[in-house]
Each structure stands twice: as structure tokens, then as C-alpha cells.
Image (tube, rainbow, N blue to C red):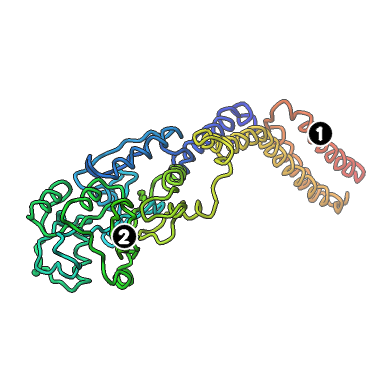
Amino acid sequence: MKLLLLYRRRWWLLYLPIVLSLGLLLAVVARVWDPLPPTRIVIGTGPAQSSYLKLARAYANRLEHLGLAVDIVTHPRPQDPLHRMAEGDPSIDVTFAQGLYAAQTNGVQALSVVGHEIIWVVAQRSIEHIDQLRGKRIATSVQDSSNRLAANLLLAHLRINGDEVKLTDHVGDEALTALASGEVDAVIHVATGDSQTANALVRMDNVRILGIERAGALAAREPNLRAVIMPQGSIELRSNLPASDLPTMVTLTHLLVRPGLHPAAQRALLDVAGELHVMAGFLERQGMYPTTLGSDFAVSPTALRHAQGLRPWMETLLPFRAAQWTQLWLFAVLPIVLLGGLLLWRAPRYIEWRVDAALQHFYGDLKFLEQDMSSITATDPAAMRAALSRLDFLERQVANMELPDRFADRWYTLREHLQHARDRLMALRNGGA
């Protein structure tokens, strides 16, 4: 392209492409790097009577103070949102699940272990030991529920075959009624220490809480279970409930997210978990939870860095939403704007470089011509004509060269140098004549 045309159209050929490229780069950064977390997340929970729904509301209350709106979506069963996340459903961002489901689900990540849930085994008072459940009717909820999973593990531990007991679908209030009426002989229920169903079960008349014998051996074989001791009187000291120390089992409760959830949103969830779960609970020491240790699910890389105290330093200085916007401007917008300013500032230098290159080309040819002129003698007319022909060709090229007015002085200087070379040749030829 001619230099004069390039100079005249520099706004369209240089500046506009730079501005458009910067705009495209900003769009790519906003799309691919994803510097800002979502403004809304979805927490999936169980039905209205689920303890996870109460927990989700506590999370929603604190997250909204950080600038994250929360939608809570209930499901017929507490494990349903977990299965949806494991199947890759992007409409659920967060859920809670027990470690009993870890072997059945992939594709989710744990942010933290936020507590544990006890495997309550409550039976008619005539049943004194858990191994007496053979031949009994046991309320364990429906297939694939945590109650049923725990019951299957306990029966296998006791070497009781499935055809030696009758497992019913009673759960919640139905299980309470069935146990009180004698319709079932025992209830296996997985719940926290403050569960309404669990508290109602253990306070029923003519029932007893059964300890899980050889709980340590079961925990050694089943990584999703932990053996703990329920101390005497820990449920209710005045009633001395339970009447003695009981070995029992717990399964860990996990705060789970889909892998694609924004790291900043994950850190916000971890901050809330640290506020909600740090206090002591039933069979839980203060500071025991939240933790990433012992998680039954794969732990999110963001959670691992958070556990090591690693997080963007801006989040330690500013509120959550302000920190995200500041990081966007500081690490994305500002560098791109500075790069754009530098390119726009240096764009005129490109035209100067093109002019320099063109002039240097002619000066190079002139240098070679002058070197050849030093060996020409007046007695060699053929060499003289060749040199004049080369010089004429250079002068025609320079004369036809179009440069912006700002470079006119350099163009005239080149013409003077060519004229000086012609004067030398003419002087040499005239001297020979």
C-alpha cells in the first residue's frame, strides 16, 4: 500500500482496528475468564420437612448480605438435587448430602464437611440388642434413601440377610405412628441431633435406643461411616437419656457444588459455612466443622486453597461484591486499556517505520552505486553509461514516491544526495572528455 494512502487513511487502517481488537479482547475476557461471580445461585434441598431446607435458608440469609441472591428449590427427596447435579444439570449450583451417597455419585465437588448425621436405631423395649433385629419389621423409608442405605449396611454388618427381615417404607411421622402401634418393631433413621423425628423417636414410651455393636469394625470396612460414642445422658440429662454410653455410627454431611460454579461464589459459601457450623453441636466439638478433612466426596480445588488460607487479597480488604468488581478493573480492564493506549500512541510510529524502510532502500541502492562509481574511469564509457542508467532509474523511483508532507524534508534530502551522485558522474565524464 502506498505510504501517502496509508497516512491519509490511518484512522480506518490503524486506529479503528486497534480499538475494535481491544473491544473484542474485553469481550473475550468477560466471557472466558469470567471475572465476576453470578448474581444468583440455586440451592437444591429436600421437601418442606427436610432439615436441609432450614439449613439452606440460613445460607441464603447470609449470602444475600454478601450480594448473592439465592433461589431454594425443593425436591421430593433430599438426595434428588444431588442426583441432578451428578447428571450434569446446571440448574442446581449447591446442595447438601450425606457421605452415604458418595459411592453412587460422581461429577460433584465438596466444599466442606459441615457436620454429621447419626444413624438412630430405635426399637421396641423388648429388643435389647441390635443383633435381635433378625426376623423383625424395620421402618427404613424407601429404596435409595439414606435410611435404607444405612439399614442395608447395618444388616450386612450383623450378617442378617434381606429375606430375614421386613423393611418397610415408613418415614417421619409415619414411622413414629407405626412404631407406637406395633406395626413395626424398629426404626432406622439417619438425622442430626436436633432432628424433630429423631427427638420424638427417642422420647417415645416403651422404646429404647440400640447401640451399634462393633461399630469400629464396621467403620473400618465402610469409609462413609464413622464410629462415635453417644455419652450417657447426652440427649437429655434429667431423664438420663440414653441410660448408658452407646456406640453408634455417623455419616458426614457435605456442602456440595457443581464443578463449574464460580470460585468467588464457592469462597462465599465457605465463608458462610465457617459462620454457621463452627459452634458445637450434638456429638460435635466446637471448631470440629467445617473441614475438608475426611470428605467422602472429591474436594473442590477452591476449597483446598481456601483451607490453606489462599484467596485473592482484594477479598480480604473489600466487601465481597466490591472486591470482584475491583479485581475486574484492576486485572482485566485496566491492563487492556493501558495496552490500547500504548498501541494507539505507537501507531504513528508504524508509518514512520514504513517511511524509514522505503528511504533506507533507496539509500542502500545509492550506496552500492557510489561504491561502483569509485572504480569507474573516464576511459570506460560503457561503465559510465551503466552507472548513469542506474542513477536515472533511482531518480524516477524517488520522483514517483508519494510521502506525507511531514516527511518532505527527508525526501528532498534524498533528492540532493542523488543529485550529488549525478554531479560526480558528470564531472568524471567531462574530465575524461
Mark 1 = which residue? Answer: 413
The quadrant of the image that shows the N terminus is top right
The amino acid on which the numbered mark 2 sits, given as a three-letter code, is: Val
Q: Which residue lies furthest to the right in this view?
A: 431
Q: Categorize mark 1 by other alpha carbons within 10 Å: few (<14), some (14-19), many (20+).
A: few
Q: On the image, which quarter does residue 122 sit in?
A: bottom left
Mark in front: 2 vs 1: 2
From the image, tell me which residue sits under label 2: 250
Relative placement, left or right, of 397 versus 252 is right
On the image, the x and y values in percent for residue 252 come to 34, 57
Considering only order in the chain, which callout, 1 or 2, is on the residue closer to the N terminus?
2
Q: Residue at x 59, y 33 (%)?
A: 14
Residue 149 against residue 365 in the figure, above or below: below
* Quadrant of the rendered image containing residue 221: bottom left
Dot 1 falls on a residue whose secondary structure is helix
Towards the viewer: 293 or 83 = 293
Please tell me which residue lies in front, 93 or 33: 93
Q: In this view, does 381 lie to the left or right of 332?
A: right
Measured in 3D between alpha carbons, the distance from the residue under mark 2 to the one under mark 1, in whole angstroms, is 92 Å
Q: Position of residue 67 (x, y in %)?
A: 44, 32
Q: Which amino acid does label 1 sit on?
A: Thr
